[in-house]
Image (tube, rainbow, N blue to C red):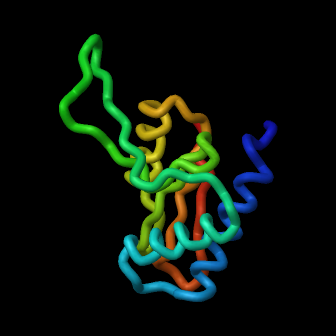
Amino acid sequence: MELIYPEESYKIVGICMEVHRNLGKGFLEIVYKDAIEYEFRKSKIAFEREREFAVQYKNIVLPHKFFADFVVLGKIILEVKSGSIITDEHIAQTLNYLKVSGLKLGLLVNFGQLSLKYKRVVL
């Protein structure tokens, strides 16, 4: 199976590794998001932070929206976690974000361990 957006994913994960190398584990997600935003700007990588998506149900739009941590290069959802592990719930959440957004690739990164852990989630 061919990887979706391999070069872009490599750059994004590399930035997350740089953030983890500098901050380590133990901070709240918001701290890692701020550092990732700094690195994206420094690297001139296009992104949207806290991108809002509406959820359609049948023929209506539900009143509650969801917010992806980042949409990078207009095509990859980046979800940031700082827990002890990446859980099935995190994967399901990322899959749901992909469904609603119409995007095909999500990167789920976890800063909560001694080394950065990440998972590619493909729709």
Q: Residue at x 26, y 23 (%)?
A: 61
Q: Residue furthest top?
A: 59
* Residue 57, picture quadrant: top left
**Residue 49 x/y as whole percent:** 45, 55
Q: Quadrant of the C terminus?
A: top right
Q: Is residue 52 above or below residue 7?
A: above
* Residue 97, picture quadrant: top left
Toward the viewer: 107 or 64? 64
**Residue 87 x/y as whole percent:** 43, 59
**Side (left or right) of 42 relative to 48:** right
Q: Quadrant of the N terminus?
A: top right
Q: How many marks?
A: 0
* Residue 115, picture quadrant: bottom right
Toward the viewer: 97 or 85? 97
Q: Residue furthest left?
A: 63
**Residue 92 x/y as whole percent:** 42, 45
Q: Is residue 63 above or below residue 80?
A: above
Q: Is residue 69 above or below residue 61?
A: below
**Residue 53 x/y as whole percent:** 37, 37
Q: Residue at x 41, y 77 (%)?
A: 31
Q: Residue at x 38, y 72 (%)?
A: 30
Q: Residue at x 55, y 85 (%)?
A: 114
